[in-house]
């Protein structure tokens, strides 16, 4: 009978493995806080979005839409579309948390961000099919997720606190595009994914004139359609 | 509707997305088309945001060399493609933007 780590040790090693990712996350939390105030959100709403929506890229896009005066329905739909990728993480994690009580499933789902998934998902992948995985692995997930959550709240608070002291000519909002440039390349695994990206990009630019800032939603739909079509043609 | 209420709805939808398969596993069979389509969400959404951020200036498409965000974005894309390093991509992209912004020929 192997010795399994205690819940406490699992939790702490989850925290520790999440730490390197905070290097990328903390600056974004701050920049989000700055941009949110710049877009006209009050401090409370800016901070609340970080705990209620709790999804960096969607929050960046949401501040832009608020600044441009998009209607409520478009704001909700756009955040939904930008966060739709989390369904992939949910599908990937589901088999490993199947046995847990509902309160654990709810808590871990709330914490299931890109960065928490990156750490917890690779832990589950490392364990692979071993017959005796640690029965407290969900504490590892909780440690990783909680660390990311705390860092996101604190860095948002720092950005909100610094507020208007950062001049506009620094163009810090451009970090959003740069982050997404860095994130999009690893997703271009085959021709179909490339077709999805190019189609969505082109449609997004062509759809600029669409009313109610619907462009992103239409572009995402077109890109997904193109990806499916190319996949079918090559199959 | 107040912005806070809108964000609460968006937050609930995000939570539901994250919970979806975790809650449904073993209870509902998902349509295979939906599962296949999900794979294309990240490239489509990310690229749509990037294209509008770097190709659009003052509300209209701008492909001229005077568009500094396009120049800086191209430099960053090269770094991202070659290194897959997020921090390096951001560093090079911001440096390129600041340099291009300070050049008088724009």
Image (cartoon, coloured by chain):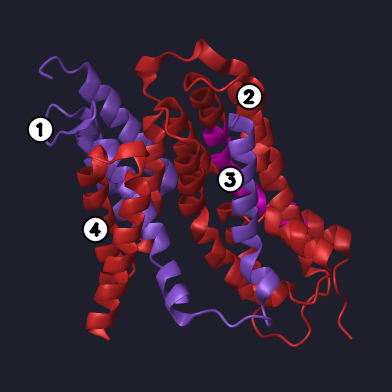
Chain colours: A red, B purple
Mark found first going from the N terminus, 2 or 4: 2
Q: Disc 1 marks which residue?
A: B64
Q: Is residue A194 left or right of residue B18?
A: left
The question of residue A26 being in magenta is answered with yes
Q: Disc 4 marks which residue?
A: A199
Chain letter for mark 4: A
Q: Kindly tell me whether residue A54 is visible in this rendering.
A: no
Marks 2 and 4 sit apart, C-alpha to C-alpha, by 38 Å
Observer-side mark, 2 or 3, equals 3
Mark 2 and mark 3 residues within 8 Å of each other at the beta carbon: no
Observer-side mark, 4 or 1, equals 4
Observer-side mark, 1 or 3, equals 3
- Is disc 2 placed on a helix, strand or loop? helix
Tell me where residue A196 appears, x and y as whole percent: 29, 63
Chain letter for mark 1: B
Q: Is residue A232 left or right of residue A101?
A: left
Same chain, labels 2 and 1: no
Q: Which disc is residue A140 wearing? A: none
In depth, the one of A192 and B91 nearer the eye is A192
Crowding around mark 2 (Cα neighbors within 10 Å: few <14, some 14 to 19, many 20+) is some
Q: Kindly tell me whether residue B38 is visible in this rendering.
A: yes
Marks 3 and 4 sit apart, C-alpha to C-alpha, by 26 Å
Work out which residue is located at the far front of the displayed protein and give it: B1
Mark 3 and mark 4 residues within 8 Å of each other at the beta carbon: no
- Is disc 1 placed on a helix, strand or loop? loop
Q: Disc 3 marks which residue?
A: B10
Residue B51, quarter of picture: top left
Chain letter for mark 2: A
Q: Which residues are magenta?
A: A13-29
């Amino acid at each position: 009978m192997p010795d399994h780590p205690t819940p406490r040790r699992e939790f702490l090693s989850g925290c520790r493995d999440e730490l390197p990712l905070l290097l990328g996350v903390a600056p974004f939390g701050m920049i989000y806080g700055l941009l949110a105030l710049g877009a006209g959100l009050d401090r409370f709403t800016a901070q609340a979005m970080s705990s209620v929506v709790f999804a960096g890229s969607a929050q960046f896009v949401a501040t832009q839409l608020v600044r441009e005066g998009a209607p409520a329905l478009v704001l909700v739909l756009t955040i939904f579309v930008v966060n739709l990728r989390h369904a992939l993480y949910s599908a990937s994690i589901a088999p490993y948390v199947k046995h847990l009580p509902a309160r654990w499933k709810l808590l871990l789902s709330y914490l299931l961000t890109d960065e928490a998934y990156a750490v917890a998902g690779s832990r589950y992948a490392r364990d692979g099919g071993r017959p005796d995985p640690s029965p407290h692995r969900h504490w590892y997930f909780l440690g990783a997720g909680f660390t990311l959550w705390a860092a996101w709240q604190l860095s948002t608070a720092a950005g909100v606190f610094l507020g208007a002291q950062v001049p506009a000519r620094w163009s810090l909002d451009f970090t959003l595009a740069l982050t997404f440039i860095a994130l999009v390349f690893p997703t271009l695994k085959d021709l179909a994914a490339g077709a999805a990206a190019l189609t969505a990009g082109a449609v997004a630019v062509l759809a600029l004139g669409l009313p109610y800032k619907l462009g992103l939603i239409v572009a995402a739909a077109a890109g997904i359609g193109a990806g499916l079509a190319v996949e079918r043609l090559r199959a | 509707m107040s912005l806070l209420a809108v964000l609460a709805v968006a937050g609930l939808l995000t939570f539901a997305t994250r919970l979806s398969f975790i809650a449904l596993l073993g209870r509902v069979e998902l349509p295979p088309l939906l599962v296949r389509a999900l794979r294309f969400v990240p490239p489509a959404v990310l690229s749509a945001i990037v294209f509008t951020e770097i190709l659009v200036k003052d509300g209209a498409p701008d492909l001229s060399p005077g568009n500094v965000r396009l120049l800086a974005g191209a430099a960053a894309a090269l770094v991202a493609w070659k290194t897959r390093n997020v921090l390096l991509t951001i560093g090079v992209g911001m440096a390129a933007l600041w340099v291009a912004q300070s050049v008088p020929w724009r």
